[in-house]
Amino acid sequence: MSAGDDAARERQALIALNRVPRVGAAKARALTRAFGSLAEAAKAPPGRLAERCRELGPDLAEEVAQALRSDFAAREEARAEAANVRILTWLDDLYPESLRALAAAPLCLYCAGEPRLLAQAQVGVVGTRAASVYGAEQARRFGRRLAEAGLHVTSGLAEGVDSAAHEGALLADGPGRTIAVVGTALDCLYPAGRKPLARDIARRGGLVVSEYPFGRHGDAKTFPQRNRLIAALARAVLVVETGARGGTLITVSFAQTFGRALYALPGRADWPGFEGNHRLIRDGDARLVTSPEHILEDFGELDLRPGGGEGEPAGAPLGLTDDERRIWEALGPDECSVEELAARTGLPLPAVSANVIALQMHRRVRPLPGGRVRRA
Protein backbone atom coordinates (compact mmCIF):
# COMPACT_ATOMS: atom_id res chain seq x y z
CA MET A 1 0.00 0.00 0.00
CA SER A 2 1.54 3.34 -1.08
CA ALA A 3 1.66 6.52 1.00
CA GLY A 4 -0.89 8.01 -1.40
CA ASP A 5 -3.28 5.12 -0.74
CA ASP A 6 -2.82 5.54 3.00
CA ALA A 7 -3.57 9.25 2.77
CA ALA A 8 -6.68 8.58 0.67
CA ARG A 9 -7.97 6.08 3.23
CA GLU A 10 -7.37 8.54 6.09
CA ARG A 11 -9.14 11.25 4.13
CA GLN A 12 -12.17 9.03 3.50
CA ALA A 13 -12.23 8.07 7.17
CA LEU A 14 -12.42 11.75 8.15
CA ILE A 15 -15.33 12.32 5.76
CA ALA A 16 -17.08 9.28 7.24
CA LEU A 17 -16.50 10.39 10.84
CA ASN A 18 -17.83 13.84 10.00
CA ARG A 19 -21.31 12.35 9.59
CA VAL A 20 -21.36 11.31 13.29
CA PRO A 21 -22.59 14.39 15.20
CA ARG A 22 -20.87 13.51 18.47
CA VAL A 23 -17.45 13.00 16.89
CA GLY A 24 -15.20 16.00 16.42
CA ALA A 25 -11.51 16.75 16.30
CA ALA A 26 -10.76 15.54 19.84
CA LYS A 27 -12.26 12.08 19.31
CA ALA A 28 -10.76 11.74 15.83
CA ARG A 29 -7.34 12.49 17.27
CA ALA A 30 -7.94 10.09 20.15
CA LEU A 31 -8.80 7.33 17.66
CA THR A 32 -5.62 8.07 15.72
CA ARG A 33 -3.51 7.85 18.88
CA ALA A 34 -5.19 4.63 19.96
CA PHE A 35 -4.83 2.79 16.64
CA GLY A 36 -2.05 4.62 14.83
CA SER A 37 -4.40 5.72 12.06
CA LEU A 38 -8.11 6.02 11.34
CA ALA A 39 -7.75 3.38 8.65
CA GLU A 40 -6.59 0.91 11.32
CA ALA A 41 -9.42 1.97 13.61
CA ALA A 42 -11.86 1.12 10.81
CA LYS A 43 -10.78 -2.53 11.06
CA ALA A 44 -11.65 -2.81 14.75
CA PRO A 45 -15.06 -4.01 16.04
CA PRO A 46 -17.08 -1.61 18.24
CA GLY A 47 -16.01 -3.28 21.46
CA ARG A 48 -12.36 -2.88 20.59
CA LEU A 49 -12.91 0.77 19.67
CA ALA A 50 -14.54 1.45 23.03
CA GLU A 51 -11.83 -0.46 24.88
CA ARG A 52 -8.85 1.30 23.32
CA CYS A 53 -10.47 4.73 22.90
CA ARG A 54 -12.35 5.38 26.12
CA GLU A 55 -13.46 8.80 24.90
CA LEU A 56 -16.07 7.04 22.77
CA GLY A 57 -18.07 4.77 25.06
CA PRO A 58 -20.02 1.72 23.81
CA ASP A 59 -22.90 3.50 22.05
CA LEU A 60 -20.74 5.99 20.20
CA ALA A 61 -18.22 3.29 19.32
CA GLU A 62 -21.02 1.44 17.52
CA GLU A 63 -21.85 4.57 15.49
CA VAL A 64 -18.18 5.17 14.69
CA ALA A 65 -17.65 1.58 13.54
CA GLN A 66 -20.67 1.76 11.26
CA ALA A 67 -19.53 5.07 9.78
CA LEU A 68 -15.95 3.94 9.15
CA ARG A 69 -17.06 0.71 7.48
CA SER A 70 -19.74 2.33 5.32
CA ASP A 71 -19.40 3.65 1.77
CA PHE A 72 -20.55 7.07 3.00
CA ALA A 73 -17.33 8.84 2.00
CA ALA A 74 -17.48 7.62 -1.59
CA ARG A 75 -21.15 8.57 -1.87
CA GLU A 76 -20.54 11.98 -0.29
CA GLU A 77 -17.67 12.74 -2.66
CA ALA A 78 -19.78 11.73 -5.65
CA ARG A 79 -22.56 13.99 -4.43
CA ALA A 80 -20.10 16.84 -3.94
CA GLU A 81 -18.69 16.43 -7.44
CA ALA A 82 -22.19 16.53 -8.92
CA ALA A 83 -22.92 19.75 -6.98
CA ASN A 84 -19.57 21.36 -7.90
CA VAL A 85 -18.54 21.29 -4.25
CA ARG A 86 -15.06 20.47 -3.01
CA ILE A 87 -14.58 18.63 0.28
CA LEU A 88 -11.42 19.50 2.21
CA THR A 89 -10.22 17.51 5.20
CA TRP A 90 -7.49 18.60 7.58
CA LEU A 91 -5.14 16.36 5.56
CA ASP A 92 -5.54 18.54 2.46
CA ASP A 93 -3.10 21.33 1.61
CA LEU A 94 -5.88 23.88 1.05
CA TYR A 95 -7.27 23.33 4.55
CA PRO A 96 -6.43 26.65 6.32
CA GLU A 97 -3.81 26.67 9.05
CA SER A 98 -5.92 29.07 11.12
CA LEU A 99 -8.52 26.28 11.51
CA ARG A 100 -6.03 23.43 11.78
CA ALA A 101 -4.66 25.01 14.98
CA LEU A 102 -8.06 24.91 16.71
CA ALA A 103 -8.68 22.29 19.38
CA ALA A 104 -12.14 21.91 17.81
CA ALA A 105 -10.92 21.98 14.22
CA PRO A 106 -13.54 20.90 11.65
CA LEU A 107 -12.87 17.43 10.27
CA CYS A 108 -14.12 18.60 6.86
CA LEU A 109 -14.93 21.77 4.97
CA TYR A 110 -17.48 21.70 2.15
CA CYS A 111 -16.55 24.47 -0.29
CA ALA A 112 -18.71 25.97 -3.04
CA GLY A 113 -16.59 28.47 -4.92
CA GLU A 114 -12.89 29.20 -4.49
CA PRO A 115 -11.33 27.36 -1.50
CA ARG A 116 -7.96 29.12 -1.90
CA LEU A 117 -9.56 32.20 -0.33
CA LEU A 118 -9.52 30.43 3.05
CA ALA A 119 -5.80 31.08 3.50
CA GLN A 120 -5.94 34.72 2.39
CA ALA A 121 -6.38 37.90 4.43
CA GLN A 122 -9.93 38.31 5.71
CA VAL A 123 -11.97 40.69 7.83
CA GLY A 124 -15.01 39.32 9.61
CA VAL A 125 -18.01 41.66 9.36
CA VAL A 126 -20.78 40.62 11.75
CA GLY A 127 -23.93 41.90 13.37
CA THR A 128 -27.59 41.41 14.13
CA ARG A 129 -30.14 39.80 11.83
CA ALA A 130 -32.56 42.61 12.76
CA ALA A 131 -30.34 45.32 11.34
CA SER A 132 -31.47 48.92 11.25
CA VAL A 133 -31.37 50.79 7.95
CA TYR A 134 -28.24 52.52 9.21
CA GLY A 135 -26.60 49.23 10.21
CA ALA A 136 -27.30 47.63 6.83
CA GLU A 137 -25.97 50.69 5.00
CA GLN A 138 -22.76 50.65 7.03
CA ALA A 139 -22.27 46.91 6.48
CA ARG A 140 -22.52 47.42 2.72
CA ARG A 141 -20.20 50.44 2.85
CA PHE A 142 -17.52 48.65 4.86
CA GLY A 143 -17.91 45.41 2.89
CA ARG A 144 -17.44 47.17 -0.42
CA ARG A 145 -14.46 49.30 0.62
CA LEU A 146 -12.60 46.45 2.34
CA ALA A 147 -13.04 44.26 -0.74
CA GLU A 148 -11.90 47.11 -3.02
CA ALA A 149 -8.72 47.28 -0.92
CA GLY A 150 -8.05 43.58 -1.54
CA LEU A 151 -9.30 42.08 1.71
CA HIS A 152 -11.85 39.26 1.74
CA VAL A 153 -15.05 39.97 3.69
CA THR A 154 -16.12 37.00 5.80
CA SER A 155 -19.56 36.71 7.38
CA GLY A 156 -22.34 34.22 8.11
CA LEU A 157 -24.90 34.68 5.27
CA ALA A 158 -27.63 35.50 7.80
CA GLU A 159 -30.22 38.18 7.20
CA GLY A 160 -29.39 41.71 8.23
CA VAL A 161 -25.76 42.74 8.69
CA ASP A 162 -24.22 39.53 7.30
CA SER A 163 -26.06 39.67 3.99
CA ALA A 164 -25.45 43.40 3.62
CA ALA A 165 -21.70 42.89 4.13
CA HIS A 166 -21.63 40.13 1.48
CA GLU A 167 -23.63 42.32 -0.91
CA GLY A 168 -21.27 45.24 -0.39
CA ALA A 169 -18.25 43.07 -1.17
CA LEU A 170 -19.93 41.83 -4.35
CA LEU A 171 -20.31 45.44 -5.47
CA ALA A 172 -16.57 46.05 -5.16
CA ASP A 173 -14.46 46.76 -8.22
CA GLY A 174 -11.32 45.24 -6.77
CA PRO A 175 -9.46 42.04 -5.94
CA GLY A 176 -11.26 41.28 -2.67
CA ARG A 177 -13.97 38.64 -2.50
CA THR A 178 -16.50 37.54 0.12
CA ILE A 179 -16.66 34.31 2.12
CA ALA A 180 -19.91 33.03 3.64
CA VAL A 181 -19.50 30.57 6.51
CA VAL A 182 -22.82 28.82 7.07
CA GLY A 183 -24.26 26.92 10.02
CA THR A 184 -26.00 24.25 7.94
CA ALA A 185 -25.08 21.90 5.12
CA LEU A 186 -24.67 23.61 1.77
CA ASP A 187 -27.87 21.96 0.54
CA CYS A 188 -29.87 23.05 3.61
CA LEU A 189 -29.16 26.78 3.73
CA TYR A 190 -31.14 28.75 6.30
CA PRO A 191 -32.95 30.98 5.78
CA ALA A 192 -33.90 29.68 2.34
CA GLY A 193 -34.11 33.22 1.06
CA ARG A 194 -30.30 33.45 1.21
CA LYS A 195 -29.83 30.81 -1.52
CA PRO A 196 -29.65 33.32 -4.42
CA LEU A 197 -27.00 35.31 -2.55
CA ALA A 198 -25.02 32.13 -1.85
CA ARG A 199 -25.12 31.18 -5.53
CA ASP A 200 -24.00 34.68 -6.49
CA ILE A 201 -21.06 34.55 -4.07
CA ALA A 202 -19.83 31.21 -5.44
CA ARG A 203 -20.40 32.19 -9.07
CA ARG A 204 -18.47 35.45 -8.75
CA GLY A 205 -15.26 34.04 -7.31
CA GLY A 206 -16.16 34.03 -3.62
CA LEU A 207 -16.71 31.06 -1.34
CA VAL A 208 -19.56 29.49 0.61
CA VAL A 209 -18.21 27.03 3.18
CA SER A 210 -19.72 24.62 5.71
CA GLU A 211 -18.28 22.03 8.08
CA TYR A 212 -21.44 19.91 7.88
CA PRO A 213 -22.19 16.96 5.57
CA PHE A 214 -24.99 17.12 3.03
CA GLY A 215 -28.43 16.91 4.61
CA ARG A 216 -27.49 18.50 7.96
CA HIS A 217 -29.99 21.16 9.04
CA GLY A 218 -29.05 23.92 11.43
CA ASP A 219 -29.85 23.89 15.13
CA ALA A 220 -29.00 25.70 18.36
CA LYS A 221 -25.43 24.31 18.25
CA THR A 222 -24.47 24.63 14.61
CA PHE A 223 -24.80 28.40 14.30
CA PRO A 224 -22.55 29.23 17.31
CA GLN A 225 -20.08 26.68 15.91
CA ARG A 226 -20.18 28.59 12.62
CA ASN A 227 -19.26 31.77 14.52
CA ARG A 228 -15.99 30.26 15.79
CA LEU A 229 -14.92 29.63 12.19
CA ILE A 230 -15.59 33.24 11.18
CA ALA A 231 -13.45 34.46 14.08
CA ALA A 232 -10.69 31.93 13.39
CA LEU A 233 -10.48 32.64 9.66
CA ALA A 234 -10.50 36.43 9.99
CA ARG A 235 -7.48 38.51 10.95
CA ALA A 236 -9.83 41.18 12.33
CA VAL A 237 -13.53 41.37 13.21
CA LEU A 238 -15.82 44.36 12.74
CA VAL A 239 -19.04 44.54 14.79
CA VAL A 240 -21.50 46.63 12.77
CA GLU A 241 -24.58 46.42 15.00
CA THR A 242 -25.47 44.27 17.99
CA GLY A 243 -27.62 44.54 21.07
CA ALA A 244 -26.77 43.40 24.58
CA ARG A 245 -27.21 39.72 23.62
CA GLY A 246 -27.00 37.62 20.50
CA GLY A 247 -24.86 35.48 18.28
CA THR A 248 -22.64 38.40 17.31
CA LEU A 249 -21.23 38.48 20.83
CA ILE A 250 -20.38 34.77 20.52
CA THR A 251 -18.24 35.67 17.52
CA VAL A 252 -16.70 38.49 19.57
CA SER A 253 -15.83 36.06 22.36
CA PHE A 254 -14.10 33.73 19.92
CA ALA A 255 -12.27 36.66 18.33
CA GLN A 256 -10.95 37.70 21.73
CA THR A 257 -9.86 34.14 22.48
CA PHE A 258 -7.98 33.94 19.17
CA GLY A 259 -6.36 37.34 19.64
CA ARG A 260 -8.08 39.01 16.71
CA ALA A 261 -8.23 42.78 16.27
CA LEU A 262 -11.73 43.93 17.18
CA TYR A 263 -13.58 46.97 15.83
CA ALA A 264 -17.07 48.36 16.47
CA LEU A 265 -19.22 51.05 14.88
CA PRO A 266 -21.01 53.56 17.13
CA GLY A 267 -24.76 54.12 16.89
CA ARG A 268 -27.10 56.58 18.50
CA ALA A 269 -26.69 56.59 22.25
CA ASP A 270 -30.35 55.69 22.82
CA TRP A 271 -30.52 52.83 20.29
CA PRO A 272 -30.89 49.45 22.09
CA GLY A 273 -29.69 47.76 18.89
CA PHE A 274 -26.21 49.23 19.44
CA GLU A 275 -25.93 48.50 23.15
CA GLY A 276 -23.41 45.72 22.50
CA ASN A 277 -21.29 47.98 20.28
CA HIS A 278 -21.20 50.73 22.87
CA ARG A 279 -20.25 48.34 25.66
CA LEU A 280 -17.37 46.91 23.61
CA ILE A 281 -16.10 50.41 22.90
CA ARG A 282 -16.63 51.66 26.47
CA ASP A 283 -14.82 48.68 27.99
CA GLY A 284 -11.88 49.03 25.63
CA ASP A 285 -12.49 45.67 23.97
CA ALA A 286 -13.06 47.15 20.50
CA ARG A 287 -11.70 50.16 18.71
CA LEU A 288 -14.31 52.72 17.60
CA VAL A 289 -14.32 53.08 13.82
CA THR A 290 -16.39 55.32 11.60
CA SER A 291 -14.60 54.65 8.31
CA PRO A 292 -13.19 51.57 6.56
CA GLU A 293 -9.91 53.48 6.33
CA HIS A 294 -9.46 53.09 10.09
CA ILE A 295 -9.28 49.33 9.62
CA LEU A 296 -7.14 49.55 6.48
CA GLU A 297 -4.63 51.79 8.29
CA ASP A 298 -4.22 49.14 11.00
CA PHE A 299 -4.27 46.12 8.76
CA GLY A 300 -0.67 46.44 7.65
CA GLU A 301 0.35 46.00 11.29
CA LEU A 302 -1.60 42.77 11.76
CA ASP A 303 -0.12 39.30 11.33
CA LEU A 304 -1.33 38.38 7.85
CA ARG A 305 0.42 35.02 7.54
CA PRO A 306 -1.94 32.09 6.98
CA GLY A 307 -2.81 30.85 10.44
CA GLY A 308 -1.04 33.82 12.07
CA GLY A 309 -2.38 35.79 15.01
CA GLU A 310 -3.79 32.63 16.54
CA GLY A 311 -2.64 33.57 20.01
CA GLU A 312 -0.18 30.68 20.08
CA PRO A 313 2.64 30.80 22.61
CA ALA A 314 6.24 30.87 21.46
CA GLY A 315 6.49 27.19 22.33
CA ALA A 316 4.23 24.37 21.14
CA PRO A 317 1.14 25.23 19.09
CA LEU A 318 -2.34 25.23 20.58
CA GLY A 319 -4.59 22.21 20.26
CA LEU A 320 -2.01 19.49 21.04
CA THR A 321 -2.38 16.74 23.62
CA ASP A 322 0.20 16.44 26.40
CA ASP A 323 2.08 13.65 24.56
CA GLU A 324 1.96 15.50 21.22
CA ARG A 325 3.34 18.59 22.96
CA ARG A 326 6.18 16.57 24.54
CA ILE A 327 7.13 15.13 21.17
CA TRP A 328 6.93 18.48 19.40
CA GLU A 329 9.13 20.11 22.04
CA ALA A 330 11.58 17.18 22.05
CA LEU A 331 11.91 17.40 18.29
CA GLY A 332 13.34 20.89 18.48
CA PRO A 333 14.56 22.66 15.34
CA ASP A 334 16.40 19.62 13.93
CA GLU A 335 15.27 16.40 12.28
CA CYS A 336 15.41 13.07 14.10
CA SER A 337 14.02 9.54 14.04
CA VAL A 338 11.03 8.16 15.90
CA GLU A 339 13.43 6.06 17.96
CA GLU A 340 15.34 9.17 19.01
CA LEU A 341 12.08 10.85 19.98
CA ALA A 342 11.17 7.87 22.15
CA ALA A 343 14.53 8.17 23.91
CA ARG A 344 14.16 11.91 24.40
CA THR A 345 10.60 11.79 25.73
CA GLY A 346 10.63 8.49 27.59
CA LEU A 347 7.40 7.49 25.85
CA PRO A 348 6.92 3.97 24.46
CA LEU A 349 7.88 3.65 20.79
CA PRO A 350 4.31 2.71 19.64
CA ALA A 351 2.92 5.79 21.41
CA VAL A 352 5.53 8.01 19.78
CA SER A 353 4.74 6.56 16.35
CA ALA A 354 0.99 7.15 16.78
CA ASN A 355 1.50 10.71 18.01
CA VAL A 356 3.91 11.51 15.19
CA ILE A 357 1.20 10.44 12.73
CA ALA A 358 -1.28 12.70 14.54
CA LEU A 359 1.20 15.59 14.36
CA GLN A 360 1.59 14.98 10.63
CA MET A 361 -2.21 15.15 10.30
CA HIS A 362 -2.09 18.52 12.10
CA ARG A 363 0.65 19.64 9.67
CA ARG A 364 2.91 20.21 12.69
CA VAL A 365 5.49 17.58 11.72
CA ARG A 366 6.83 16.79 8.26
CA PRO A 367 8.07 13.28 7.31
CA LEU A 368 11.52 12.99 5.74
CA PRO A 369 13.31 10.15 3.91
CA GLY A 370 14.71 7.37 6.06
CA GLY A 371 11.91 7.45 8.58
CA ARG A 372 12.99 10.78 10.06
CA VAL A 373 10.79 13.78 10.86
CA ARG A 374 11.11 17.47 11.57
CA ARG A 375 8.83 20.35 12.54
CA ALA A 376 6.72 21.61 9.65
Image: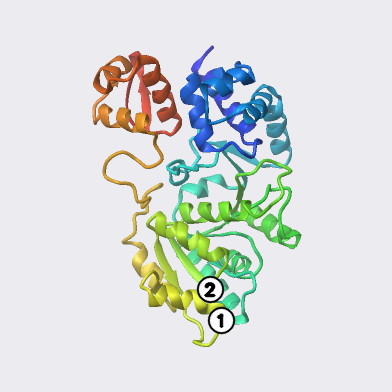
Q: Nearer the viewer, residue 237 or 323?
A: 323
Identify the element where label 1 is drawn.
helix
Snapshot quadrant of residue 180: bottom right
Q: Amino acid at mark 1?
A: Pro
Whether residues under marks 2 and 1 lie with C-beta atoms below 8 angstroms apart, the answer is yes
Q: Is residue 42 above or below residue 187?
A: above
Q: Which residue is at a point 39% across and 24% down the rendered structure image?
A: 356
Percent across and percent down for residue 127 are 56, 69
Residue position marked by numbered label 2 in the rendering: 244
Percent across and percent down for residue 358 are 44, 28
Q: Which of pointers 2 and 1 lies earlier in the amino acid sequence?
A: 2
Packing grade of label 1 (10 A; few <14, some 14-19, many >=20) is some
Q: Nearer the viewer, residue 285 or 100?
A: 285
Residue position marked by numbered label 1 in the rendering: 272
Q: Amino acid at mark 2?
A: Ala
Percent across and percent down for residue 210 are 62, 47
